[in-house]
Image: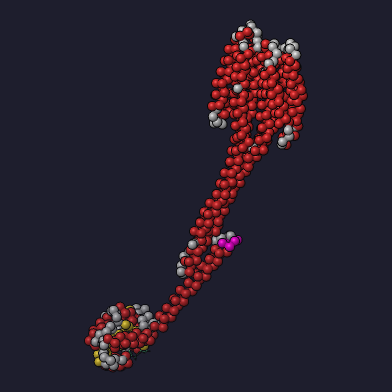
Amino acid sequence: MRLTRMFAVSMAILALLVGAMLGRILWGEWNSYRAARGGLHALQLVQQGMVAAEKLSFERGPMNAVLGDAVPPDPAKRARLAVARAASDQALDSLAAALAASQDQSATVTSIRAQLIAARREVDAVSALPPAQRTPQRLTAAVEGMFALIPVVLDDVTGYAGAAEQAYPNLAKILMKARFAVELREYAGRLGSRLTVALASGQPLAETEHTQIQFLRGQIEQLRHLIVMSTSAIDRDPRVLAALRTMDERYFTSGLALVTGVERDSRAHQPYGMDTAQFAQRYVPFMSPILAVRDVLLEAALDQARQDYDTAQRELLLACLTGGAIVLAMMLLMVILQKRVMVPLARTTRALVKLGNGDFSIRVHETRRHDEIGDLLRAVGQLRAAGLEKQQLEQERQRLIEELRLRADTDYLTGILNRRAFTAAGNQRLRRAREHRLALAVILFDVDRFKAVNDSHGHDAGDQVLIRIAALAREQLRDGEILARYGGEEFVIMPGNCDLEGARVVAERMRRAIEAAPLTLANGHVLHVTASFGVAASEGPHLALDSLFHAADLALYRAKHQGRNRVECEAA
Ligand SMILES: Nc1nc2c(ncn2[C@@H]2O[C@H](COP(=O)(O)OP(=O)(O)OP(=O)(O)O)[C@@H](O)[C@H]2O)c(=O)[nH]1
């Protein structure tokens, strides 16, 4: 796998792992936060539910007063009942609103309301009757209707408390105690209500009522015991201890003593000395410390829940920030690695491959980096420079070799092949001619009366003539024909494979070309130069350059002696 690919795959795997880990942590924190928020809300519902239960319980006080009212009715008693009813309605409204806000179903509140309306209607119906017609049965039915509401509300409270306990298991005991306080308040209220009928009628309590009162007192004592019992750190909270002390002093001493007094008067058939309203006016304030206990316990629980909620919120925020920072750092690391390592590495690799293939066209940028990549880039630059230098040296060497080769093969004056190069080329031709049984010819030619040119016009002029003759001959050359300076003013031509006649035609062409081209010297003198030609050709297995040259030389000699500027042939 290529490194760039491996890098991309590794980064993707790392991102996935980190993402999964962060997701898991965030999910956990989010759930803790949600549970804490839900728990806190449930706890607030508990509080509101308990307040609703309290208000409904409290409503029974003025209700009892109205039920025991004479004719015409006392407007003050009616007004107190209206105020108590409004407080109950408001508490139920608050509970319904809180439930609606949490998108919880508030059906129970609706059914409590329906039940409450029915109970109130019964109370109003009984209280509208003349006192004589308010039979104990009707009065009991009216009172029981209001009693029946409380367990329903408390059942709901138990449900909310369950949800809160799920979020805050350590608050279970304290919530239980708060609920006990509500129940205690309820039983305390019921205890007072048990006296309503007797106080309203001025009749002694029936034996069954005495029994019920004893039963209620037993329950009240039991609830007190459960509340006072120390079960958690919150119980040792000074606020809680103070509230419990007040409850004992006010309700369990003074409140219960009031009930005991009524019971005693009833058994002794003594007048009570107070009616229902007067009893309620004295008894109800003694119950307030019970609710204060409830409130203090709930407040302590709410404080604890708020702390837990704040912690969960802080943890979630911290997890989000840490997660974000990790993701950001990872992305930054990836970008840096990609930019600072992978891209330069890939570029350098490509450059090195090109250098290895002898391609020095790559561009190497100057770098100020002082790390491994910087060293690598500088090394590539040095490699390229060294390679370039080597390449230039090689080119120079090749050029020099070529020049040397040319010099070795070239006549320094005329620029055409020299005798050595001609001999090498001639031998090649000879081998091929022997192999393919082809004819081979040689044409020797010599400038006529050249000594006279030198003598008359100087050696430089002679050189110019030689240069000119070579140029003319070269112009006349055709494919496969080789021209060389054989020595002094003597030249040699080897035509392509042809016989004696073919070679003679070539020689004649050359001769005419030289003859037809006068030469103007540097001093302005015009020279008419001619040359004599000796042609020789041969073929067969015994073909040899020496014999060809010898025959051509003989023919040239004859051409000189027969008047010059002519072509003579000689079979080799
Ligand atoms: N300028 C010059 N002269 C050269 C060169 N090589 C040979 N010569 C001269 O060429 C002349 C050749 O003269 P000869 O061999 O007597 O022949 P010729 O004067 O051409 O007379 P024929 O060949 O009989 O027509 C000599 O004077 C050489 O010095 C050269 O490279 N440059």
Quadrant location, ligand no. 1: bottom left
Q: State yes or no: residue 155 in magenta.
A: no
How many numbered circles does the render carry?
Answer: 0
Quadrant of the rendered image containing residue 298: top right
Q: How is the image coloured?
A: secondary structure
Figure quadrant of the C terminus: bottom left
Q: For the point 63% across and 13% down, which residue is it? A: 136
Q: For the point 32% across and 83% down, which residue is it? A: 483
Residue 20 at x, y = what percent?
55, 49
Q: Is residue 454 left or right of residue 538?
A: right
Give whichever of 47, 279 is nearer the camera.
279
Residue 519 at x, y = what percent?
32, 80
Q: For the point 58% across and 18% down, which residue is it? A: 119
Quadrant of the rendered image containing residue 107: top right
Q: State yes or no: residue 373 in magenta.
A: yes
Q: Is residue 461 visible?
A: no
Residue 80 at x, y = what percent?
65, 14
Q: Is the magenta region chiefly helix, strand or loop? A: helix
Q: For the point 62% across and 43% down, which residue is it? A: 318
Residue 335 at x, y = what percent?
54, 53
Give whichever of 23, 76 is nearer the camera.
76
Pick out the residue farthest to the front: 207
Give whichever of 163, 489 is nearer the camera.
163
Q: Is residue 144 visible?
A: yes
Q: Is residue 5 above or below residue 322?
A: below
Q: Is residue 180 left or right of residue 38?
A: right
Q: Which residues are magenta?
A: 370-374
Pick out the residue farthest to the left: 501
Give whichever of 426, 408 is nearer the camera.
426
